[in-house]
């Protein structure tokens, strides 16, 4: 099925040549593409097969390149917790390993077919949990994972730095296949561009792995724009995975137009703004639990002053959630799903109740007018403070070095 078929399948207008031209023009003029996209959304609600049962119906599947996945995935990003046998997310939740496995299995039973993880999450631990949880249902699901950092497998810790050398990629894929208990990785991303390795070498390596059947599709996370084009020229990319939500709309400027132009899918990470868009964070929240700082404590946009300034966004989400008879988390995810029919968010959670709630977002449909209003209201909120700590942010949007 082509991307155009996909648009039809989701009740959106097909991407025709004029529309592509319009978007290309928008990119050239640096106009936010969603401003144009909402002009082509039907003005009345489109019929939807979704129910609010927290189950994703197969009729709502989306495409990342040629890879078919459920309209939402599940983020599986856990590290070892202080208590033996427990895992923590990067935030303030800790669950035991059995609960994590149960969460993944419940997601499968609820129609989720896309599971996102990475070698770096743990490291290795999250891939092991995903592999264990998906035993017996492997053929019904799509596993996506990521390489690109350097870890010492003997002591399971970071060596520091990025590593996308072809021999390293080939070596880490073997470890991933073992941990994920599978013979192929459906979608393998470079986690961050390696400033030492031309993307042509990376894409060529992935092309080899695809020819061997060990990898079925590949993608890039937080790449530079020219890096996307250069990789795609070597072998077609299935997906770009970047942060994108009402809280961080950076991809609208250039990444989404390039994806649209080249027929590449888009997977937004932190689609709930690291929990901010769920309405559970207040201006007084400080991200320090039992004396220890969690990830958001070091993120500039969550510093006390920045947090206070953007509570207006939470008000927008809550108001619209009420209007659409939804929860704030559902509203935030539905907004992402409405932007493009080839966007597949991967919210993270440690709770089955939240998982079910989040899947309910697929039942929410905006009219063209509603989406225009909501987009304008979201755009009017000023977001201050960098989205990530400086050391992490500097790895985003990096162009891989030229091939000599
Ligand atoms: N490519 C990359 O570089 C990259 C970077 C970061 C993340 N990721 C991927 O993206 C996935 C999602 O991102 P994320 O976990 O950083 O952020 P997120 O999905 O935006 O937010 C997760 C947070 O929201 C909370 N939450 C989820 N559903 C909720 C609900 N219905 N009500 C209230 N709170 C809710 C979770 O807490 P509870 O546990 O309490 O639900 C958690 O604190 C990750 O799991 C990972 O797979 C990729």
Image (tube, rainbow, N blue to C red):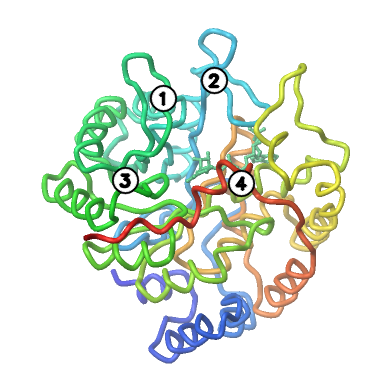
Q: Closer to the camera, 350 or 87?
A: 87
Circle 3: element type: strand
Q: Is residue 21 above or below residue 260?
A: below
Give the labeled residue for mark 1: 129
Instruction: Name the mark on residue 121.
Output: none
Q: Is residue 341 above or below residue 117?
A: below
Q: Nearer the viewer, mark 2 or mark 4?
A: 2
Asked whether disc 1 touches disc 2, contact meaning CB atoms under 8 Å apart, the reply is: yes
Give the labeled residue for mark 3: 188
Q: Closer to the camera, 349 or 121?
A: 121
Q: Which quarter of the picture shows residue 89? A: top right
**Upstream in sequence: badge 3 or badge 1:** 1
Asked whether disc 3 touches disc 1, contact meaning CB atoms under 8 Å apart, the reply is: no
Between the residue at mark 1 and the residue at mark 2, the CA separation in whole angstroms equals: 10 Å
Instruction: Name the mark on residue 87.
Output: 2
Give the labeled residue for mark 4: 358
Between the residue at mark 2 and the residue at mark 4, the CA separation in whole angstroms equals: 21 Å
| Place of residue 326 in the rendered image (x, y in percent of width and height, measured from the top left) | 73, 54
Circle 4: element type: helix
Circle 1: element type: helix
Kindly tell me whether mark 1's CB lies below 8 Å from ligand 1. Answer: no
């Amino acid at each position: 099925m082509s991307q155009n078929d996909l648009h039809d399948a989701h009740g959106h207008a097909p991407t025709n040549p004029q529309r592509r031209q319009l978007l290309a023009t928008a990119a050239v003029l640096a106009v936010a593409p969603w401003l144009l996209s909402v002009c082509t959304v039907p003005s009345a609600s489109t019929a939807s097969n979704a129910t609010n049962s927290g189950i994703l119906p197969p009729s709502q599947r989306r495409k990342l390149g040629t890879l078919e996945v459920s309209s939402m995935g599940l983020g599986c990003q856990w590290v070892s917790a202080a208590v033996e046998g427990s895992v923590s997310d990067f935030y303030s939740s800790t669950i035991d390993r059995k609960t994590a496995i149960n969460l993944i299995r419940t997601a499968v039973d609820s129609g989720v077919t896309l599971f996102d993880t990475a070698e770096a999450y743990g490291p290795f631990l999250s891939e092991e949990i995903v592999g264990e949880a998906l035993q017996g249902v492997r053929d019904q699901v799509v596993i996506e994972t990521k390489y690109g950092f350097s870890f010492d497998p003997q002591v399971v810790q970071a060596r520091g730095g990025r590593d996308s050398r072809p021999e390293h990629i080939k070596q880490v894929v073997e470890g991933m296949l073992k941990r994920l208990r599978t013979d192929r990785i459906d979608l393998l991303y470079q986690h961050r561009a390696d400033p030492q390795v031309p993307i042509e070498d990376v894409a060529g390596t992935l092309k080899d792995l695809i020819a061997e059947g060990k990898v079925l599709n590949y993608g890039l996370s937080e790449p530079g724009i020219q890096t996307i084009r250069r990789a795609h020229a070597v072998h077609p990319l299935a997906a770009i995975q970047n942060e994108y939500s009402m809280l961080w709309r950076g991809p609208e400027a250039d990444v989404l137009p390039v994806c649209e132009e080249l027929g590449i899918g888009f997977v937004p990470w932190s689609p709930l703004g690291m929990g901010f868009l769920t309405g559970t964070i207040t201006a007084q929240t400080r991200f320090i639990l039992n004396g220890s700082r969690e990830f958001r404590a070091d993120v500039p946009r969550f510093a006390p002053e920045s947090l206070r300034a953007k509570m207006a966004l939470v008000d927008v989400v809550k108001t619209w959630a009420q209007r659409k008879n939804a929860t704030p988390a559902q509203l935030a995810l539905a907004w992402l799903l409405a932007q493009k029919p080839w966007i597949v968010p991967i919210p993270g959670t440690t709770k089955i109740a939240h998982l079910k709630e989040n899947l309910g977002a697929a039942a929410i449909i905006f009219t063209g007018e509603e989406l225009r209003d909501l987009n304008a209201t979201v755009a009017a909120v000023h977001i201050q403070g960098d989205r990530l700590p400086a050391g992490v942010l500097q790895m985003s949007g990096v162009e891989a070095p030229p091939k000599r």
